[in-house]
Image: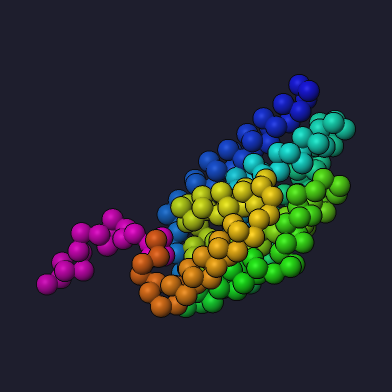
Amino acid sequence: MRLRHAVTAATLGLAVTGWVLMIRLMDGMDMGPATSLGPFAIFVAGWASMIAAMMLPGTVPAVMRRARAGAGTAALFVAAYLGVWTLVGVAVFVLYRPHGPAAAGVLVIAAGAYELTPVKRHFRRRCGESGHSGFGYGLHCVGSSVGLMLVLVAVGIMNIGWMCVITAWCLAQKLLPSRAAVDVPLALAVVALGLVLLTAPEVVPGLHPPPSPLDGGGHHHSHH
């Protein structure tokens, strides 16, 4: 029992460390959809921190089950899980391009549509089960959360506010049973967000970066 508590504390501690590292690594890098990812090594470090922060809290029940077989088994499970998500980060780095609100809107609509598919429901159910390795668990949970992560990539991959929203959503989907009465309206809300990005992007929070102190005080008037 003590081991399971220790494993839970370590998993949550890793998640907290992920938030701290991520906020430090991403400070000043959020430009909404126009964000550039920067050098590969720094991006992967930031992505791994982000995944630890966002995804590990929801893995606690699965990790606790692994802890019955010993701390080493639990640690390998977590490492394999984070490894799968890090590979997703490499794919994001390869495929990602800074983009405008219209492209963001198309991606978000696609993500909302994915939330309504049987494929999503299958992966979500499998992600909630316990019978697989860290690698298998990671693959099923990627399949479950990929739509929501696509929303984050679309609206601003470095935006802490959107990360908090997506984290809460992923956590709820991992830990709560699937209910159409909840899931369908939320999926439709994602589609609606995509439509707003296409038609009135200025109303979406976090889409446009706050002016930096250098541009802030109207220095563009200074030459008049």
Q: Quadrant of residue 101?
A: bottom left
Q: Residue furthest top?
A: 2
Work out whether residue 31 or residue 166 is closer to the camera in this orientation and state it: 166
What secondary structure prevails in the magenta region?
Answer: loop
Work out whether residue 83 or residue 74 is closer to the camera in this orientation and state it: 74
Q: Residue furthest front?
A: 181
The figure's colour scheme reads rainbow
Q: Is residue 217 magenta?
A: yes
Quadrant placement of the C terminus? bottom left
Q: Quadrant of residue 1?
A: top right
Asked if residue 48 can be seen in this view, the reply is no
Q: Report whether 27 appears left or right of 66.
A: left
Work out whether residue 78 or residue 35 is closer to the camera in this orientation and state it: 78
Q: Report whether 222 appears left or right of 167.
A: left
- Place of residue 102 in the rendered image (x, y in percent of width and height, measured from the top left): 47, 78
Q: Is residue 62 magenta?
A: no
Q: Residue at x 80, y 43 (%)?
A: 77
Stretch in magenta: 206-224
Q: How many marks?
A: 0
Q: Residue at x 65, y 52 (%)?
A: 173
Work out whether residue 65 or residue 177 is closer to the camera in this orientation and state it: 177
- Place of residue 13 in the rendered image (x, y in percent of width and height, measured from the top left): 63, 34
Asked if residue 77 can be seen in this view, the reply is yes
Q: Residue at x 80, y 48 (%)?
A: 129
Q: Residue at x 82, y 45 (%)?
A: 130
Q: Is residue 50 above or below residue 34?
A: above
Q: Residue furthest left?
A: 224
- Place of residue 168 in the rendered image (x, y in percent of width and height, measured from the top left): 56, 49
Q: Is residue 196 above or below residue 54?
A: below
- Place of residue 81 in the rendered image (x, y in percent of width and height, measured from the top left): 75, 49
